Image (tube, rainbow, N blue to C red):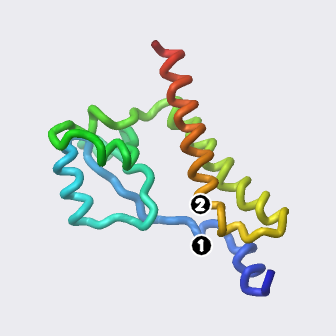
Amino acid sequence: MNREQEDEWHQPVMTLARRDIDILNQDLTVEQALKTIRERGVGEKIVYFYVVDGREQLTGVLPTRRLLSAPLDRRLADIMVRIGTSVLLTLCAACFFGLTVPAVLHAFRLDPKIAAGPVTLAFTDIFTLFFYFSVAALLL
């Protein structure tokens, strides 16, 4: 590992974390949301959009796949994942894998940037589905 990579490894995490988030109102239809996204633009790697109510309070998250595959006349409130236990567990899993995968790759003397994004995303997606269906099974 060269000196530049060493320095990058020891930077505070907040210098590398994204600060731009994408917020959509729950009363928008899918068509209106897509128009808003096209007008505002989005970050490079969007996995979820944050859905808020009229008071700007978080009410749910909307996976990009769900937004792109829903009928244009559906309201976001109908297709979003409501904030709850599954989202909390998903956030914990994402943090865990986001911290663990680069550390494991670094321990094996591999560049953490090579697979950290795709591997972390894959693990997080798998555990998101597991948590989501587990919580749904407990509630139904």
Residue type indicated by callout 2:
Gly
| Label 2 SS | helix
Residue 111 relative to residue 31: left or right = right
Tag 2 residue: 117
Tag 1 residue: 15
Q: Is residue 50 above or below residue 41?
A: above
Q: Residue at x 66, y 68 (%)?
A: 114
The image shows residue 140 at horizontal and vertical percentages of: 46, 13
Q: Residue at x 33, y 44 (%)?
A: 51
Q: Nearer the viewer, residue 1 or 88?
A: 1
For marks 2 and 1, give the one nearer the viewer: 2
Label 2 crowd (10 A; few <14 / some 14-19 / many >=20) = some
Q: Nearer the viewer, residue 21 or 140?
A: 140
The label shown at residue 86 is none
Q: Is residue 121 above or below residue 43?
A: above
Residue 115 relative to residue 138: left or right = right
Q: Nearer the viewer, residue 127 or 23?
A: 127
Q: Residue at x 23, y 54 (%)?
A: 34
Residue 102 relative to residue 93: left or right = right
The part of the image, by quadrant, that contains residue 109 is bottom right
Label 1 crowd (10 A; few <14 / some 14-19 / many >=20) = few
| Label 1 SS | helix
**Residue that protrudes farthest toward the bottom in the picture:** 3
Disc 2 versus disc 1: distance between alpha carbons? Answer: 17 Å
Q: Is residue 59 above or below residue 99?
A: above
Q: In which quadrant will I find the N terminus?
A: bottom right
Q: Residue at x 65, y 54 (%)?
A: 98
The part of the image, by quadrant, that contains residue 54 is top left
The image shows residue 24 at horizontal and vertical percentages of: 29, 50
Residue type indicated by callout 1:
Thr
Which of marks 1 and 2 precedes in the sequence? 1
The image shows residue 65 at horizontal and vertical percentages of: 37, 46
